[in-house]
Amino acid sequence: MEHFAPNFPRREFEASQTAVRRDIDNTIPQELLPNAIRLSWWLQELRNKINRLHRTEGSARELPIIVTSGYRCPDLNKAIGGSASSQHMKAQAVDFGVPGMTPRELVDFIVKHHPGFDQMIEEFGRWVHVSVVADNPRGEVLVARKSGGKTSYSPLKQNSK
């Protein structure tokens, strides 16, 4: 894999309104490109699986994956209050959603149909965070909630279907 996936170009992982507003260069460094490319292909495979299932349910309309946060350089990560150990800074993590699917439905779909992730977090009922690594992915599934101004993470209990 030398190139980004067709539906997930490099610019999608580098885009950040905060970086633009604060004049932060959020270009993915050359040494991290393999991580970002791996992540783009993981997302492409997920998109393909979602749409294959969606078509079998009778819809002709394709569902996109909307990336809301990809790579974050250290300055951008600090500016948004990201974790000091965020996998976003290694170009291994992405936050995203799929119109027509709740974050929980998306998490359940990924667990059932698209393993191989390192960590997945259903964040605040608003989006899904996924990290992808080259070796020994943990397959960890968490939920993040805010209480009293602090974020807590706990294992996500899977729906039994």
Image (cartoon, rainbow, N blue to C red):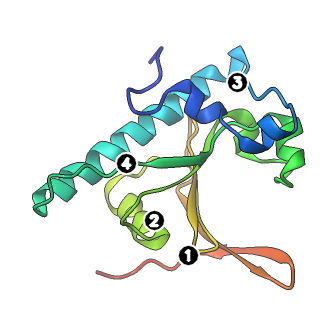
Between disc 1 and disc 3, whose residue precedes?
3
Q: Report the quarter where the C terminus lies.
A: bottom left
Q: Badge 4 local density, few (<14 within 10 Å), some, or many (20+)?
A: some
Q: Which residue is mark 2?
A: 107
Q: Are marks 3 and 4 in contact (CB under 8 Å)?
A: no
Badge 2 amino acid: Val
Q: Which residue is mark 1?
A: 156
Between disc 3 and disc 2, whose residue precedes?
3
C-alpha distance separating marks 1 and 3? 31 Å
Between disc 3 and disc 4, whose residue precedes?
3
Residue mark closest to the camera, 3 vs 2: 3
Q: Are marks 4 and 2 in contact (CB under 8 Å)?
A: no
Q: Badge 1 local density, few (<14 within 10 Å), some, or many (20+)?
A: some
C-alpha distance separating marks 4 and 2? 16 Å
Q: Secondary structure at mark 2?
A: helix
Residue 138 in sight in this render:
yes
Q: Which residue is mark 4?
A: 64
136 relative to 60, above or below? above
Q: Which mark is residue 70?
A: none
Residue mark closest to the camera, 4 vs 2: 4
